[in-house]
């Protein structure tokens, strides 16, 4: 018999009371573990989101957004230097052009409507570059004098297979076929479902552009009408056919981590000087991780609250126990026990109760971790949707006619999807942290009773007779 | 030898100061068996507490084997109580969730006696007080009052103290068990050459001790 065995045995002097304490404490510790797991899962997710979502930089020729503005295109040589900047992992180059009835057999899958006609009328003197006029004859009208406006077909040359997805659409699916080999100059194309439907295209079908016959090798669904009206061909092919050799109208630079976003953005600005407008996705990343950081904060506060609650439970229990055993403590002091011995006995008792509660609480924590985490995220995402509208309308690049796959709301939805359904697992590290916090609970909970013990005089053993 | 010189003990009770012991002086020789009698509130238990270093006197000195316990530090007092004084209480004050033998081992554990040695001595002491045949493995709740008090006496003797202080040791026992306990204390004081100071209301028991001190209102009114 020693301090430890006495302390352990004392923990079970009143089985019903000890059982009740253990259950209450286990709930508290279970919450601690669940919150630890939630916090860890959220931190992991933030790191993942930062690495995958907020790690792109958009480079456009200075003064140009899509087909708006003016100026000179960038060159592949300039972007080759960008690719060599530290932390840059990939540079996806794109060249956009508009196809008119003069150089393509394709018709846009989007009807102009009032907005399209408004844009046509406001586009400057004469037929602007964004306008396509077809004769009524071409449109099947009996009145040959009438010309009606139709939406142009945007064709994009790209040097990377992930170009479509990189430009923002996280729910891109291939309806048939696949992406072409971007490294080869070939007369192949992938088209969106909207334009393929309008032109009755399927994999293997052909169309003409720049007096060249292209073969459709893939049909994609980018999830919205605008993006599904696009045509993609290899960058080198478009540069050759459109007489824009070496020209690039946009690039998306991917870096290793969003932590380096600012420094790499500055490096690119420095590299390209006034030739380019350089913008990054820091705001988008911030908007994406904001709800997660908020959940992390909630998890942290809940964790602290649960630790305090556990400590208070143990504190009250131990105060009750010390008061109950006042005479016994006096007797122990009378027969030679020091304050330290008695305090340790009570600490061991508190640790015993906490350790058992830890075992039970671990089970509770494992079961509750994922549902609690998702409930926190779900609630927080809902409030973010209500209060943080701008994040949902963030656009990548922007511009009226820029071939962007990050239309209004899409990125926000994708970001929200990215933070939902987090799997919070209770691993060894979480358990170790939980055990350490349980120990903190036991020690904090034993502190005040220990002080009470030191103030009990051995003479109390006789006075209470 | 126990030498008590001008010991005064005062308590603060609200705004008043109560004098529980008023300049007590007496001497008890080694191996002597003395009793302290007096009415309730006379200061008997307070005196016992002060003698046992459970409480400190307001003034005066208490020397046990030439050591003034009133001047010992807290740390030394704990050690002193553990090794030099044995207590026997009216309500036995055994630790309820420990067995009889574990209760007896407790003071020896505090004195850092090796586990085997303390168990052997505890069993031997319990045999001496008649706690045998498996009763030494019972918890206090499974023992009679007389048996519990015998365990309490065995515990008081665990570290072979110079002084045993017994506060109304027969107070909760019937006359037969009371006599048995008194005889046991008497026998052990003789065999172990231990000084025993017993506080009692029972004048028959007091009459059988070597000397009797009578307290009244904190003062020693007679020594027989």
Image (cartoon, helix red, strand yellow):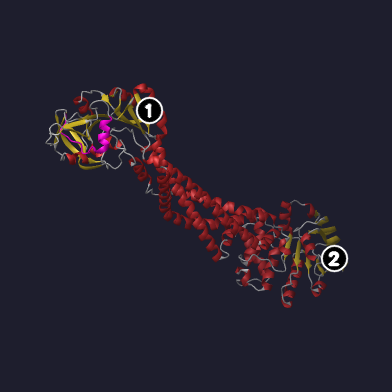
The question of residue A110 being in magenta is answered with yes
- Whole-percent x, y for residue A441 in the image: 55, 52
Q: Is residue A89 above or below residue B139?
A: above
Tell whether A138 sits left or right of A220: left
Instruction: Indicate which disc residue A208 carries.
Output: none
Same chain for labels 1 and 2? Say yes or no.
no
Q: Chain of mark 1?
A: A
Camera-side residue of A71 and B39: A71
Tell whether B66 sits left or right of A336: right
Q: Is residue A4 above or below residue A124?
A: below
Is residue B177 among what the camera can see?
A: yes
Secondary structure of the residue carrying tag 1 is loop
Residues rendered magenta in the picture: A103-122
Is residue A436 among what the camera can see?
A: no
Camera-side residue of A313 and B127: A313
Instruction: Indicate which disc residue B217 carries.
Output: 2
- Whole-percent x, y for residue A402 in the image: 29, 32
Q: Chain of mark 2?
A: B
The question of residue A60 being in magenta is answered with no
């Amino acid at each position: 018999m020693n301090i430890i065995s006495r302390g352990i045995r004392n923990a079970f002097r009143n089985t019903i009371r000890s059982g009740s304490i253990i259950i209450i404490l286990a709930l508290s510790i279970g919450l601690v573990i669940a919150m630890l797991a939630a916090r860890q899962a959220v931190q992991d997710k933030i790191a993942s989101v930062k690495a995958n979502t907020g790690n792109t930089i958009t480079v456009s020729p200075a003064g140009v957004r899509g087909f708006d503005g003016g100026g000179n295109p960038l060159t592949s040589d300039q972007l080759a230097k960008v690719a060599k900047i530290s932390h840059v992992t990939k540079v996806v180059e794109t060249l956009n052009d508009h196809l008119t009835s003069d150089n393509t057999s394709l018709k846009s899958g989007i009807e102009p409507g009032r907005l399209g006609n408004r844009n046509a009328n406001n586009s400057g003197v004469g037929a602007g570059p964004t306008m396509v006029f077809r004769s009524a004859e071409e449109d099947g009208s009996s009145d040959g004098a009438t010309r009606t406006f139709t939406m142009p077909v945007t064709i994009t040359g790209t040097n990377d297979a992930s170009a479509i997805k990189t430009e923002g659409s996280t729910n891109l699916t291939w309806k048939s076929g696949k992406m072409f080999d971007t490294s080869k100059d070939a007369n192949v194309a992938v088209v969106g479902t909207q334009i393929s439907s309008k032109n009755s295209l399927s994999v293997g079908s052909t169309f003409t552009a720049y007096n060249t016959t292209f073969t459709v090798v893939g049909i994609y669904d980018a999830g919205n009408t605008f993006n599904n009206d696009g045509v993609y061909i290899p960058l080198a092919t478009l540069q050759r056919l459109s007489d824009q050799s070496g020209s690039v109208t946009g690039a998306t630079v991917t870096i290793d981590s969003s932590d380096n976003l600012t420094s790499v953005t500055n490096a690119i600005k420095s590299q390209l000087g006034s030739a380019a407008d350089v913008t990054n996705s820091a705001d988008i990343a911030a908007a994406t991780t904001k709800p997660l950081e908020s959940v992390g904060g909630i998890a942290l506060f809940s964790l602290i609250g649960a630790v305090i609650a556990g400590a208070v439970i143990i504190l009250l229990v131990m105060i009750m126990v010390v008061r109950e055993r006042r005479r016994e403590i006096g007797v122990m002091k009378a027969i030679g026990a020091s304050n330290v011995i008695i305090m340790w006995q009570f600490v061991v008792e508190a640790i015993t109760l906490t350790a058992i509660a830890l075992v039970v609480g671990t089970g509770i924590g494992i079961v509750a971790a994922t549902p609690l985490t998702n409930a926190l995220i779900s609630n927080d995402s809902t409030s973010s949707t209500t209060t943080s509208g701008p994040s949902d309308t963030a656009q990548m690049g922007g511009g009226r006619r820029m071939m962007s796959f990050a239309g209004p709301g899409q990125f926000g939805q994708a970001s929200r999807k990215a933070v939902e359904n987090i799997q919070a697992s209770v691993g060894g590290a979480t358990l170790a942290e939980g055990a350490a916090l349980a120990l903190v609970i036991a020690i904090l909970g034993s502190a005040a009773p220990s002080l009470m013990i030191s103030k009990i005089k051995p003479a109390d053993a006789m006075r209470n007779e | 030898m126990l030498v008590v010189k001008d010991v005064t003990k005062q308590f603060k009770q609200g705004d008043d100061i109560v004098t529980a012991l008023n300049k007590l002086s007496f001497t008890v020789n080694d191996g002597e068996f003395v009793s302290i009698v007096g009415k309730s509130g006379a200061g008997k238990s307070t005196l016992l507490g002060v003698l046992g270093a459970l409480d400190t006197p307001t003034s005066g000195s208490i020397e046990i084997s030439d050591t003034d316990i009133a001047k010992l530090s807290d740390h030394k007092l704990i050690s002193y109580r553990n090794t030099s004084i044995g207590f026997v209480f009216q309500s036995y004050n055994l630790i309820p969730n420990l067995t009889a033998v574990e209760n007896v081992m407790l003071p020896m554990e505090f004195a850092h006696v090796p586990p085997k040695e303390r168990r052997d001595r505890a069993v031997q002491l319990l045999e001496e007080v008649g706690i045998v045949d498996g009763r030494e493995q019972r918890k206090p709740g499974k023992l009679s009052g007389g048996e519990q008090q015998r365990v309490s006496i065995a515990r008081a003797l665990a570290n072979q103290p110079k002084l045993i202080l017994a506060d109304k040791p027969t107070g909760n026992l019937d006359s037969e068990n009371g006599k048995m306990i008194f005889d046991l204390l008497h026998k052990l004081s003789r065999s172990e050459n231990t000084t025993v100071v017993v506080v009692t209301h029972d004048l028959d028991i007091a009459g059988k001790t070597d000397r009797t001190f009578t307290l009244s209102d904190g003062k020693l009114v007679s020594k027989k």
